[in-house]
């Protein structure tokens, strides 16, 4: 399980790209459970939703507070939550691919200071996929092109080959996809946020500042 480095490019077919860029961006499946959300009382918490690429062609959206679930590996998962909510540019309700977080941690070089993200993601995928389980998720059936865009960093390029020659898709297409997925979230149409689970833990205040170093800056 790994994200593409932000400097890398991914080769896919032009047919996959064309299909992906003309989709509405709406998920093909409904949220997996309907239990009322349990929200933390702290006003400092920002609502961030995370896209979790589950290769080869699917993804899953969960509430960032799901990383505070007691059934996930802690304290690593809560440290990831802090990165997701405390890094610059976060706004309530924004959609954050984990590949973006990977880029913000110097293309993964700073993960050892945060925690075992691979173990956390494996546990999170299991938690969210349990029928009637302990947290709510929005599974997506995405074509390869969209999966590649979400699994790559914000400045990566996807190279497609077709009869007219190579085509490059990158930041603008990725941002457009994220906007489409954000518009498909329940909160965008007046619904309630995805349920992150019950008995959520409070993240530690240490360290006071989480490591942050966008790759190449």
Image (cartoon, rainbow, N blue to C red):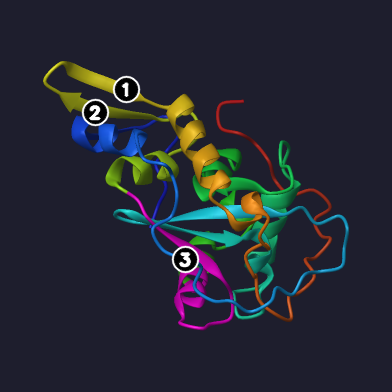
Query: Residue 100 at what x, y percent from top left?
Result: 55, 42
- Asked if 157 appears above or below 198 in the picture, the reply is above
> Which mark's residue is nearer the viewer, 3 or 2?
3
Residue numbers of the magenta segment = 123-142
Which mark is drawn over residue 168?
Answer: 1
Query: For the residues marked 1 and 2, what is the alpha-carbon distance in whole angstroms?
Result: 6 Å
- Asked if 77 appears above or below 140 in the picture, the reply is below
Q: Disc 3 or 2, which lies upstream in sequence?
A: 3
Is residue 49 toward the left or the right of residue 139 in the image?
A: right
- The secondary element bearing badge 2 is classed as strand
Disc 2: which residue: 160
Q: Residue at x 20, y 34 (%)?
A: 15
Query: For the residues marked 3 and 2, what is the alpha-carbon distance in whole angstroms?
Result: 31 Å
Is residue 45 toward the left or the right of residue 158 in the image?
A: right
Magenta span contains residue 6: no
Q: How many marks?
A: 3
Q: Disc 1 or 3, which lies upstream in sequence?
A: 3
Q: CB of mark 1 within 8 Å of CB of mark 3? A: no
> Which mark's residue is nearer the viewer, 1 or 3?
3
Q: CB of mark 1 within 8 Å of CB of mark 2? A: yes
Disc 3: which residue: 30
Query: Residue 173 at what x, y percent from top left?
Result: 43, 29
């Amino acid at each position: 399980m790994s994200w593409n480095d932000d400097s890398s490019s991914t080769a896919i077919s032009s047919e996959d790209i064309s299909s992906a860029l003309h989709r509405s961006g709406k998920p093909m499946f409904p949220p997996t459970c309907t239990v009322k959300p349990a929200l933390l009382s702290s006003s400092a918490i920002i609502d961030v939703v995370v896209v979790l690429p589950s290769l080869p062609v699917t993804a899953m959206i969960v509430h960032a507070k799901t990383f505070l679930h007691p059934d996930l590996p802690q304290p690593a998962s809560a440290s990831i939550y802090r990165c997701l909510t405390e890094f610059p540019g976060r706004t309530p309700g924004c959609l954050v691919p984990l590949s973006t977080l990977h880029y913000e941690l110097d293309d993964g070089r700073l993960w050892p200071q945060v925690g075992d993200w691979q173990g956390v993601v494996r546990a999170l995928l299991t938690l969210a996929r349990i029928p009637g389980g302990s947290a709510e998720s929005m599974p997506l059936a995405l074509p390869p092109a969209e999966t590649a865009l979400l699994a790559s960093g914000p400045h990566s390029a996807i190279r497609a080959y077709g009869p007219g020659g190579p085509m490059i898709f990158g930041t603008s297409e990725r941002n457009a996809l994220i906007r489409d997925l954000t518009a498909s979230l329940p909160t965008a149409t007046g619904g309630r946020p995805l349920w992150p689970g019950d008995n959520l833990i409070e993240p530690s205040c240490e360290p006071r500042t989480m490591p942050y170093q966008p790759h190449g800056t």
